[in-house]
Amino acid sequence: MLVHDVKDPRIQLVTVTGVDLTSDMSLAKIYVTFYGERDKQEEAWKAMNNALGFMRTEIAKRIRLRSVPSLVLVKDTSMEYSAHIQSILEKIKEKECFHD
């Protein structure tokens, strides 16, 4: 849907990393990761939030449910955190190499 139907050019370099749906299917948390420059990420975040109504309407058209869940976006920073930990580990390894 993001690739083919949402026409906002600000939505680029976005990956949906997961969806949590409540047991009563009233709420869907959509986890997204953004790539690229910070200002572009913020623009994409705003665009994604603006597109939530459209996405909910599209879900209603495509999936037969009694009621369509409300959609909430959540920034998934796990990739960013993983890269941060990796850089710390590399620095530790470099320091160990200098002391050998």
Image (spheres, rainbow, N blue to C red):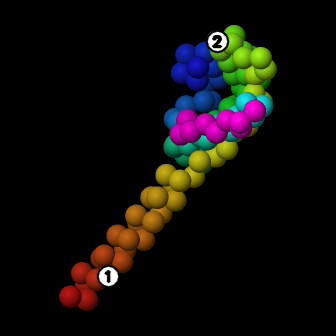
Q: Is residue 8 above or below residue 16?
A: above
Mark found first going from the N terminus, 2 or 1: 2
The residue singled out by tag 1 in the image is 95
Frontmost residue, 7 versus 62: 62
**Residue 35 visible in this rendered orientation of the protein:** yes
Q: Which mark is residue 46?
A: none
Residue plotted at (60% across, 30% down): 11
Q: Which residue is mark 2?
A: 62
Marks counted in the figure total 2
Report crowding for label 1: few under 14, some 14 to 19, many 20 or more residues within 10 A (C-alpha). Answer: few
Q: Quadrant of the N terminus?
A: top right
Residue segment shown in magenta? 16-24
Residue sitting nearer the eye, 64 or 57: 64
**Mark 2 neighbour density, 10 Å: few (under 14) some (14–19) many (20 or more):** few
Q: Is residue 100 left or right of residue 5?
A: left
Residue for point 75% across, 27% down: 69
Q: Position of residue 26 (x, y in %)?
A: 77, 31
Front one among 99 and 37: 99
User: What quarter of the picture does the C terminus occupy?
Assistant: bottom left
Residue 20: name its quadrant.
top right
The kind of residue tagged 1 is: Lys
At label 2, which amino acid type do we have? Answer: Arg
Q: Residue furthest top?
A: 61
Prevailing secondary structure class for the magenta stretch in the rendered image = strand
Q: Residue furthest bottom?
A: 99
Q: Position of residue 4 (x, y in %)?
A: 55, 16
- At 55% from the left edge and 35% from the top edge, which residue is drawn? 16
Residue 72: image x %, image y %?
73, 37
Give me the C-alpha separation between circle 2 and circle 1: 55 Å
Q: Secondary structure at mark 1?
A: helix
Secondary structure beneath dot 2 equals: helix
Q: Position of residue 93 (x, y in %)?
A: 31, 76
